[in-house]
Amino acid sequence: MKKMDRMKKLWMGIIALLTICSLGANAQNLTQTVKGVVIDKTSEKPLAGASISVVGNSNLGTTTNADGKYTLSGVPVGRQKVAIVFYGYKPVVIPEVLVTAGKEVVLDIPMEQSVTNLQEVTVKGARARKGAATNEFAVGSNRSFNVDEVTRFAGGRNDPSKLVSNFAGVVAGNDSRNDIVVRGNSPTGVLWRIEGLPSPNPNHYSTPGTSGGPVSALNTNALKTSDFLTGAFPSEFGNATAAVFDINFRTGNTDKHERTAQINLFSGAELMLEGPLGKKKNGASYLVGYRYSFAQIGTSIGLNIGTSATPKYQDWVYNIQLPKGKAGKFNFYGMGGLSSINFIGKDIDSTDFYARKDQDSKAESNFSLFGVKHTIDIGKKSYLRTSVSYSTFKNNFYVDQYPLPFVDYKNSYLLTSSENNQNTVRVGSYFNSKTSARFSWRMGFTAEGMNIKTYVIDREGKTAADNFDVIRSYNSDFLLLQNFIQAKYKATDKLTFNAGLHGTDFTFNNTYAVEPRASVSYQINNADQVYASFGMHSQLQPFPVYLYEEKLTNGTIDNNNRNLDLTKAVHYVVGYEKRFATDWRLKLEGYYQDIYNAPVETKLSGFSILNSGADFTFPNKAGLVNNGKGSNTGVEITLEKFLSKGYYLLLTTSIFDSKYKGSDGVERNTSFNYKNVLNVLGGKEWKIGKDKKNAFTLDVKLTTIGGKYATPVDLTASQAQNKEVLNEQSYNSERLASYFRLDTKFGLRLNSSVHKRSQTIYLDFQNLTNQKNVFLQSYNAQKGTIGTIYQIGFFPDLLYRITF
């Protein structure tokens, strides 16, 4: 009854909020400014004299000045389509630009030069290139995304990882975390880059070696259009075998101070400030944002957020841009997050997967990133870009055990202590040159100086009188050096070749790799394109794997994992893309990935490190060798209608097969071989209000995922050792039930001319049918039985945002 009363009060408050906001909306003569800069996509030089217009409104048009800048004033609020044309360049059409009363729209537009001068420049027949990668060397297996998309789709939780799980080839198989499986690869194969440099895992409660976490620390309101690449990446990307997040922060408004306030059950309470630095309005700006967790509200009203403990977290972000001068342009950026959670045994639900009633545990995870980026023009067609960053990462985890058999909460003793610190200095620089309209090239390097200090001890399954086992003990410095060169040649406006080379040198154990990359694309006509790409890729092992050590029966320490080589993969991709009816896109892509050098055991077994990385920890296996193999084969289909005429559609499906071989040579399904995934998303916007300047929105998402393969629990061994022990004679021999989820989101967008503000409210009903999706089978040490752990059930997410 108390839970029902709390839910009732929540909904009454939401209804009251919607009513108040609706009454405050005034939509008379609402317009806004759209501005930005038009540049050459390759050289990044400004294009003076480019024409910008709002499609369907002949009175709204302008041209860029000598610095490539433009300003369109008086643009009506709502969805607009913007067109850009410039002599000698391919026309650009940008659909679904959201114009609101509370914030100016900054739209920076890169344009691609034609090999042959166009006799007549017109947008007639031009196709919207929405979703195309911002990186000009990327061909196929890529997708750009922006803040509007992150917040639009149902079930997204304001999380970039949740967004990309809607794309073909990507699976998010855990409702409690945002790890992503790309084309059957472990989530550890994902690389995060921020402002051109590798970054620490940008998630709250992250642990060493992982790429995901329960909650994203990336503030979506600070994101610029960024790229997500899923295979055969350009040669500037290294230390990744699955996917790359290439994240960039937007700069603040250079002319006007603006504010954003937001409340969301997952991302928290937020305040963001931005505007010009100083009174000269010379291009200098600031952007600063801070968020504090709101998840305790969800737990207080009885909602299942994945655990019965209350998580606490906060994060911050900033981007300071200085005016461009003779010394070039400088940006100072940074972000960070603090997170902690305490699992108190007497307060824990017995079904909680992350804790036990006979234990108290505490987890904390903090990270910070500070960087500076410098860009300077070299001649009329080249530039040099250099970035330097410093990052810190700290993760501690402690477990206190109450004596077994469990009687009461007295006389606890330390069971596990895990303390991890990593400090990294990164330097990256590349030279980019556009020799002609046909040929461009780029070369550069990245150096990462790392210090890792880790000490992990454990005595799970033992008593207070037993000694600890040392899991990791390490404190030292080492370097990861990477370099690349890549070139692009346009034989014609239709036929383009890309080629490059990437090198990796890891001083930790003197391992290295040389990786060629290549691609070709052919634009059959204005609508149809075919392409093929190839790339060799390699990646370090997760540091918990490198640094795991084990005491042998003869008293010696086995730390041979420190000699492990890089895991390597060869990617092959072919694809076809068709853009039709001005705002539709069909994409078909096939791929094959040959994986080798994967760590496996020296003894004959079905173990492989390819099956790890979707949790907080890694398997405790010593003496591993690089004899494992794997393969991923699949076909992906994307059918997308961009938002126009008030609605959008997105259908993505993947059919794939992910296999591996352990040291016993037996081919098995990997833990990420879901076989198939289907996403169907759609949304509709209805204009409402006296002048139709407000909108009511409805977004729906349906997801089905094939069952996950898992290794069964050895009940007898688990009971004997008082901890979960898997049946290693039957690796991935069981397949769990398939996954089904329906999300539905209702939203309201309000524009007011009284104070030039805009408000957004949405209610996102996640897992609307309360489907009991199986997550895994796990051993419950307290009960001595095997139980089923389920994914998160029905969860109503709420967001309120105001910009002014």
Image: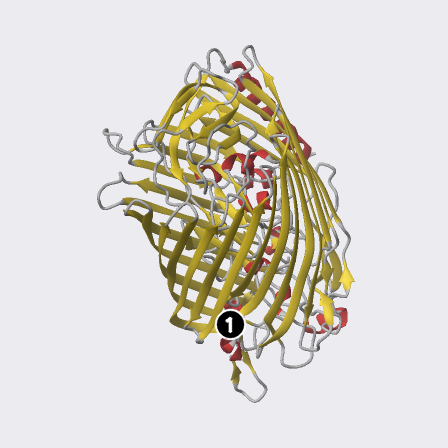
Against 16, is 497 above or below? below
Between 573 and 359, the one lying in front of the other is 573
Residue sitting at 52 percent across and 65 percent down?
539
Between 4 and 158, the one lying in front of the other is 158
The answer to which image quadrant residue 570 occupies is bottom right
Q: Which quarter of the image is occupied by the N terminus?
A: top right
Residue 744 visible within the image: no
The answer to which image quadrant residue 685 occupies is top right
Q: Is residue 706 left or right of residue 230?
A: right
Amino acid tagged 1: Tyr
In the rendered image, residue 391, in percent from the top left (x then y), is placed at 38, 56
Residue 637 visible within the image: yes
Residue sitting at 63 percent across and 43 percent down?
577
Residue sitting at 33 percent across and 27 percent down?
256
Q: Mark 1 Cα within 10 Å, few/some/many (few <14, many 20+)? A: many
In the rendered image, residue 417, in percent from the top left (x then y), is placed at 50, 66
Count of all numbered marks drawn on residues in the image: 1
- The residue that disc 1 covers is 546
Q: Which quarter of the image is occupied by the C terminus?
A: top left
Against 763, is 589 above or below? below
Between 623 and 81, the one lying in front of the other is 81
Q: Residue furthest bottom?
A: 554
In the rendered image, residue 324, in percent from the top left (x then y), is placed at 26, 40
* Tag 1 secondary structure: helix
- Color encoding of the figure: secondary structure
In the rendered image, residue 385, in percent from the top left (x then y), is placed at 33, 51
